[in-house]
Amino acid sequence: MSTPFELLLDLDQRARANSDGLPAQQDLKQYWSGVGFSLAGERCVAPLSEVAEILHVPDSITMVPGVKSWIKGVANSRGRLLPVMDLGEFLGLEPSSASTTRRILVLEQGDLICGLIVDGVQGMQHFEADTFSDCIPASTSEALQPLLAGSYQREASYLVFSLFTLAEHASFMQVALETA
């Protein structure tokens, strides 16, 4: 006659012998996410942390006198004045889409709040972290290159565009027309 402990030990051994074992642990992939947008035919992606919100281009933008042409004016965004700037025009690029697809990426960095008009927004984009390359494709416009941190590869190459780097760009803050 077996003791209760011996019966439990026998049951444990039979259960282990007939079990399939634990499933194999799968490697979890790391992902990087950003907001996809197009600018002059280029596929770009901005880090999520650099885009405060995405807006439709408002019907009424109040022009501001004495500023460069890429400053489109100010718009009312939920009760606050939002300076609106055409990012492609600032960079000297031609828009590649109809005005109906254009959107505004809102940048908030410290005291700076502004809206940047881009040709279109594709929403959140997710990339496997190991597809990042700090090399920028040679075909990329020279105007974009100083604002790029690299690219991610999926079905196509997405350029990582830093809005914060743009905000620190010397000529970005020079909005007034130069007078003689």
Image (tube, grey):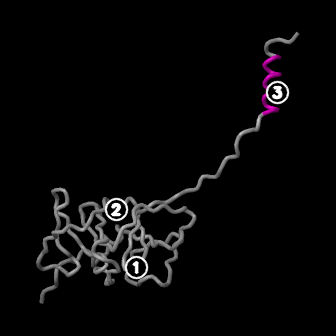
Name which residue type carries label 3.
Arg
Label 2 and label 3: CA atoms lie apart by 58 Å
Who's the residue at 20% across and 68% down the image?
Answer: 83
Which residue is tagged 1? 41
**SS of the residue at dot 1?**
loop
Q: Quadrant of the C terminus?
A: bottom left
| Highlighted range, magenta | 6-18
* Quadrant in the rendering for residue 43: bottom left
Question: In the rendered structure, which disc, 3 or 1, sits on the residue that comes first in sequence?
Answer: 3
Instruction: Looking at the image, tell me whether mark 1 or mark 2 is earlier in sequence order.
Output: 1
Task: Say what amino acid the circle numbered 1 marks.
Answer: Gly
Q: Nearer the viewer, mark 2 or mark 3?
A: 3
Q: Residue 7 in magenta?
A: yes
Return the mark for residue 112: none
Q: Which mark is residue 14?
A: 3
Q: Left or right: 88 with respect to 27?
A: left
Asked if labels 2 and 1 touch by Cβ distance under 8 angstroms, the answer is no
Classify mark 3: helix, strand or loop.
Answer: helix
**Relative to 27, residue 179 above or below:** below
Helix, strand or loop: magenta stretch = helix
